[in-house]
Amino acid sequence: MKESDMIDHRRLGRELELFVSDPLAGAGLPIWLPAGAAARHAVEEYVRDLERRAGYRHVYSPPLGKRELFELSGHLGYFADDMFPAMRLSADDEFVLRPALCPHHALVFRARGRSYRELPLRIAELGGMYRAERSGVLGGLSRVRAISLNDAHNFCALEQVGDEVREILRLIREAHAALGVRPAGFRLSLRGPGEKYVGDDAQWARAEGLLRAALDGVDFTEEPGEAAFYGPKIDIQIVDAAGRESTISTIQLDFDKPEKFDLSYTDADGSRRRPVLVHRSLVGSMERLFAYLIEVHAGAFPAWYAPVQLLLLPVDEGQAGPAVDVVRRAEAAGLRAEVDVAGSLGARIRDAARRRIPYVGVVGPREVADGAVSLRLRDGRGLAPMPVADALRLIERVVAARSGDLLPQH
């Protein structure tokens, strides 16, 4: 436990000013500070771009809906204990903070008639949802009440499900590699005794068979009782610094929602067919993801999503102006850069190390005269003075490659 205490994401979150939990805001409702928001924004941009290139269409939907929406979806019947109380505006106008995004995405599908030519239809959103977690289980970013979920719902024909699940698994592996996520294992989550589930045995058997086939060649365990109330799922697990296991990514099959919402599409022969709904999250919620990333990287994020990628340190006041000019050039190139002029050079270098900044550019009289900068890397390596354009190009290449190294791979 001593080692896990040293890399606890809550302590690092305070030290690196990534997020704050204030009693006045409420337990389980962390506030992302500028540094944490910058890192999160970079990750969100990456995930959206990854999804867009894989054929996903992004939407926005409200984080609350009428009570009837969640009665229809089954959440109020099967999930009410984890939901916040309804808000009544009038006798016939009652609203609920959503515990999931799938009901709204079902409404996206049925916004107009659909053809088999559109399938798979992949609807994605990084959206807010809310869980009425008890105060005793809340902690930092790992367990919260307001959740920002990387979510998607893929509507497809039954015969497309296997390929769709395999493609989702490929995207999950790609995202994990870029972020530095190290999965602890794959889990096939199944029904268990004494729990409430929707659907019949035939639907469940069909869904389980499809997921097993997609996991062919993958080592996984089976976990009865861990399925969603509407279907089985593949869960990809992580382990935090204290040894606690949780789910980071998930793929779930659902024959129930398409039936409840009466979703259908026109097949090639003109008949109406019901789609299969694949729920999936590549990286889970931003909160749980960053709780893990802060710990696994000990706060030293890969350069591409580090809050500040380049810190300029003028040796003395005479180089402050040129250092600011370098910052402006870096920002124009799309990098996150700052200049620090307060205190001795040694103290500023130590503070940059404390902040885990990947690149520190020292600018002295010689560098100004030569139009150069001396880069110090976060891992302690120092590079010879180089033209500013070359230094920025080096950082740009590492960021563009989303590499875990601090120097470009040749």
Image (cartoon, grey):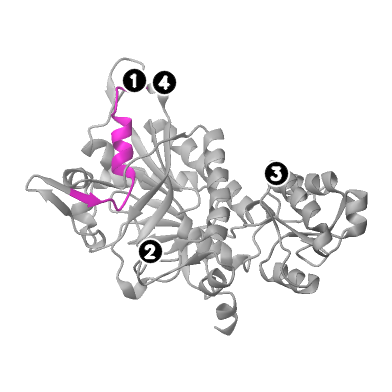
Q: CA distance from mark 4 to mark 3?
A: 35 Å
In the rendered image, residue 51, in percent from the top left (x then y), is placed at: 52, 39
Instruction: Give the residue type that dot 4 points to.
Output: Arg
Residue 78, image quadrant: bottom left
N-term-proximal mark, 2 vs 3: 2
Residues 279 and 307: in front is 307
Q: CA distance from mark 2 to mark 3?
A: 33 Å
Instruction: Give the residue type that dot 3 points to.
Output: Ala
**Residue at x 31% of width, y 66% of height:** 133
Q: Mark 1 and mark 3 in contact (Cβ < 8 Å)?
A: no
Q: Mark 3 and mark 4 in contact (Cβ < 8 Å)?
A: no
In the rendered image, residue 32, in percent from the top left (x then y), is placed at: 48, 60
Q: Which residues are magenta?
A: 95-115
Find residue 188 and name its label. Answer: none
Residues 201 and 106: in front is 106
Find residue 117 and name its label. Answer: 4
Q: CA distance from mark 3 to mark 1?
A: 42 Å
In this figure, which residue is indicated by the disc labeled 3? 400
Q: CA distance from mark 2 to mark 1?
A: 45 Å
Instruction: Give the residue type that dot 2 points to.
Output: Leu
Q: Please tell me whether mark 4 or mark 2 is closer to you in this view.
A: 2
